[in-house]
Image (cartoon, rainbow, N blue to C red):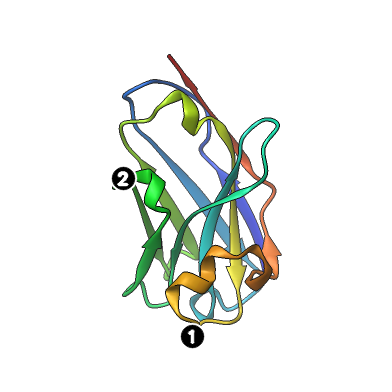
Amino acid sequence: VQLQASGGGLVQAGGSLRISCAASGGTFSSYALGWFRQAPGQEREFVAAIRRNSGSVYYSRSLNGRFTISRDNAQNAAFLQMNNLKPEDTAVYYCAASENANYALSVYRSESVYAYWGQGTLVTVSS
């Protein structure tokens, strides 16, 4: 499967942004999906994950409920709604797909379970 992240941009602190991940070339509904981010000079970190049927989601605790992951299998797309953005949310955001769809949710924190990655979309939050 090929993944294409989009929708990044410049937003003021306190604002909202929704980024998207479009998939092609595979059976989208069979994959678990994750969002990761990489801030300048830092390692990539887990943001959120969602099972293939959208019934189960998992978030980084550091987000404090500000982000929401969702997917639309009919559109072959996943989304990350980001609210109350902070300057520390500035990063390149990556979507990823895992063929291993039945792990415990906490396992999806690990980059190693994802075989497919999009190219990333830059989100910049100004103070």
> Few, some or many C-alpha atoms within 10 Å of disc 2 (few <14, some 14-19, many ≥20)?
few
User: Is 89 drawn above or below residue 100 in the view shown?
Assistant: above
The outermost residue toward the top is 127
User: Is 57 drawn above or below residue 39 in the view shown?
Assistant: below
Residue visible at 63% across and 75% down in the picture: 26
On the image, which quarter does residue 98 sit in? bottom right
Residue visible at 50% across and 82% down in the picture: 103
Task: Say how many tags the image has.
Answer: 2
Q: Percent x, y for residue 69? A: 38, 56
Q: Percent x, y for residue 84? A: 31, 31
User: Is 10 drawn above or below residue 66 in the view shown?
Assistant: above
Q: Percent x, y for residue 58? A: 39, 64
State the separation of the CA atoms marked 1 and 2: 25 Å
Q: Are marks 1 and 2 in contact (CB under 8 Å)?
A: no
Secondary-structure class at tag 2 = loop
Image quadrant in which the N terminus is located: bottom right
Secondary-structure class at tag 1 = loop
Disc 2 residue type (three-letter): Asn
Which of the two discs, 1 and 2, sits closer to the camera? 2
Q: Percent x, y for residue 28? A: 54, 73
Disc 1 residue type (three-letter): Asn
Residue visible at 40% across and 45% down in the picture: 62
On the image, which quarter does residue 53 sit in? bottom left
Precedes in sequence: disc 1 or disc 2: 2
Q: Which residue is mark 1?
A: 102
Q: Which residue is mark 2?
A: 64
> Few, some or many C-alpha atoms within 10 Å of disc 1 (few <14, some 14-19, many ≥20)?
few
